[in-house]
Amino acid sequence: MIRSELIKKLESENPELKTEEIEKIVDVFFNQIIQRLADGGRVELRGFGAFSTRERSPRKGRNPRTGASVEVPSKRVPYFKPGKEVREQLNK
């Protein structure tokens, strides 16, 4: 599902809300998750799962075009751990 499909689904389930209002709600929701992760926090949605970040160590990589060795700096990457209910639904 992409963002526009989510907005259309919410519109069909909430006809009393305007499209602009739904878009604002979706934007606020996603922006809050992003901000919390950027601050080093964790976001848990009960029954769905938890978003967090993990640290990747610096390493040596390779430029696929030239084959030259390059240094890849450390970085934080997003991580999602599905909740029990999601795992059970996927494995029915």
Image (spheres, helix red, strand yellow):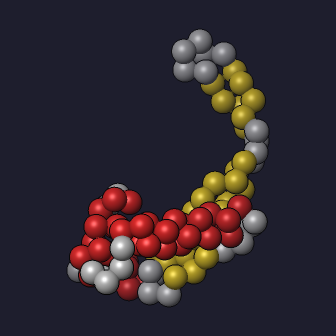
Q: Position of residue 86 (x, y in %)?
A: 37, 79
Q: Give the camera-side residue of 39 and 75.
A: 39
The N terminus lies in quadrant: bottom left
Q: Residue at x 60, y 59 (%)?
A: 78
Instruction: Determine the residue positioned at 44% across, 80% down.
Output: 48
Q: Is residue 21 visible?
A: yes
Q: Residue at x 52, y 82 (%)?
A: 45
Q: Quadrant of residue 55?
A: bottom right
Residue at (54% x, 15% y) in the render? 65
Place of residue 82 in the rendered image (x, y in percent of width and height, measured from the top left): 46, 75
Residue 84: image location, x then y, percent:
43, 84
Residue 88 visible somewhere in the drawing: no
Q: Answer with left or right where residue 78 lies relative to residue 76.
A: left
Q: How far across and how far down the image is residue 62, in percent?
A: 63, 24
Q: Is residue 19 above or below residue 66?
A: below
Residue 4 located left or right of residue 26: left
Q: How many marks?
A: 0
Relative to 46, say whether 33 is above or below: above
Q: Hey, which quadrant is residue 41 in on the image?
A: bottom right
Relative depth, front residue between 36 and 64: 36
Nearer to us in this view, 5 or 82: 5
* Figure quadrant of the C terminus: bottom left
45 vs 69: above or below? below
Residue furthest to the top: 66
| Residue 32, picture quadrant | bottom right
In the rendered view, tell whether residue 55 sits above or below residue 72.
below
